[in-house]
Amino acid sequence: MNPTIDLCWEVERLEAIGKNRARVRSVAVGGGGINVARHIARFGGRAIAVHTAGGEVGLRLNRLLDEEGVDHVAVDIAEDTREALVLFETGSRRSYHVVPSGPQLHEGEGERCLEVLERFLGGCPFVVASGSLPGGLRDDYYAAVARRVREAGARLILDTSGPALPAALAEGVFLFRCNRTEAESLAGRPVNSFDDARALNEHLLTTGAAEIAVTTLGALGALCSTSQGHTELYVPPLPGEPLSDAGAGDSMVAALATRLAAGDDPVGACALGVASAAAAMLTPSTESFDVDVARALLPQVRTVSRA
């Protein structure tokens, strides 16, 4: 609903005085849903990205997606699509991701997005709703998405934050993935351990908010919870220096969706998700992770089942 064009620039070191000479490292379309669709295709699956696009930036966004070969459908909006800036310091190997809030959508534009979504629901087993909502949409927008997906007989994978999250969970989804920040906003307390994540996931399952709850815990790993129990999944040893966590969550969701659509069990799908998120940590800024690296890391994802 709120994609970006990510401009990644390289500098040796950011200086407070004088000019910082930069080199353009990459220009790519970003945003949760688009990233997920992109990675699903790289895993060999099929996905269509439904997204907004407005103004000259929106035209460029569509052109970049066409050039990349991402299957997508754009919904025109009045205001310009946002651009984000990623600064990568080659000296320190740190990334700084600067993201504006994006356009304001009016109610009619939000309804058009729902209408386009409904056109693709027939025969579609999974829908991923990923990323924050742009301004102007109701807080229950993703709840409306959840209702339409359920009525069509599909399953919703939700990965969002902010005011839209409680309303969507009140409606109920098939799978909900959250990071530590989102988990703490729902739990109202710190979530630092697998025990903390288990308490939250159990609440999500017992209240009907989600059939599967996946809470990620940064460098520790992730907890995958279903009615069958809880499984701790530990991040494998990285074969290189971690450079950025941008896009790690999208990489995990793409792996989850791909493997669930292929018939894998949730724990197996989540294991590939953890491996993919780890692979994403090895790439600077928002660049796509190496699928072969993710597959190589998969056997090293340690799992521990709890009742």
Image (spheres, helix red, strand yellow):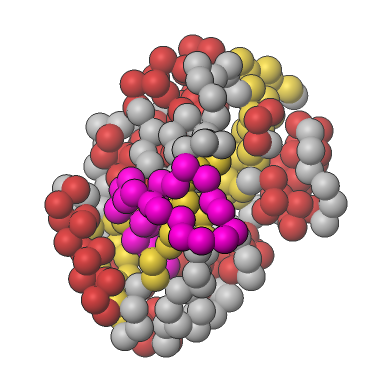
Residue occupying the point 65% across, 41% down: 215
Task: Pick the residue in front: 229 or 56.
Answer: 56
Q: Position of residue 224 (x, y in %)?
A: 62, 33
Q: Is residue 25 above or below residue 139?
A: above
Residue 271 visible? The answer is no
Q: Residue furthest top?
A: 299
Q: Position of residue 279 (x, y in %)?
A: 46, 28
Q: Position of residue 300 (x, y in %)?
A: 53, 13
Residue 271 falls left or right of residue 307? left
- Asked if one can make out residue 284 in the rendered structure from this viewpoint, the answer is yes
Magenta region includes residue 24: yes
Q: Which residue is located at x 30 percent, y 32 percent?
A: 43
Describe residue 249's horizontal placement relative to residue 230 as left or right.
left
Chain part drawn in magenta = 1-28
Tell me, yes or no, whether the highlighted magenta stretch contains residue 18.
yes
Image x and y of residue 130, in percent: 46, 56
User: Which of these two is toward me, 230 or 1?
Assistant: 1
Q: Is residue 1 above or below residue 104?
A: above
Name the quadrant containing residue 65. bottom left
Q: Is residue 89 above or below residue 58?
A: above
Q: Residue at 39% across / 21% down in the picture?
A: 293
Is residue 81 shown above or below 292? below
Q: Which image quadrant: the N terminus?
A: bottom left
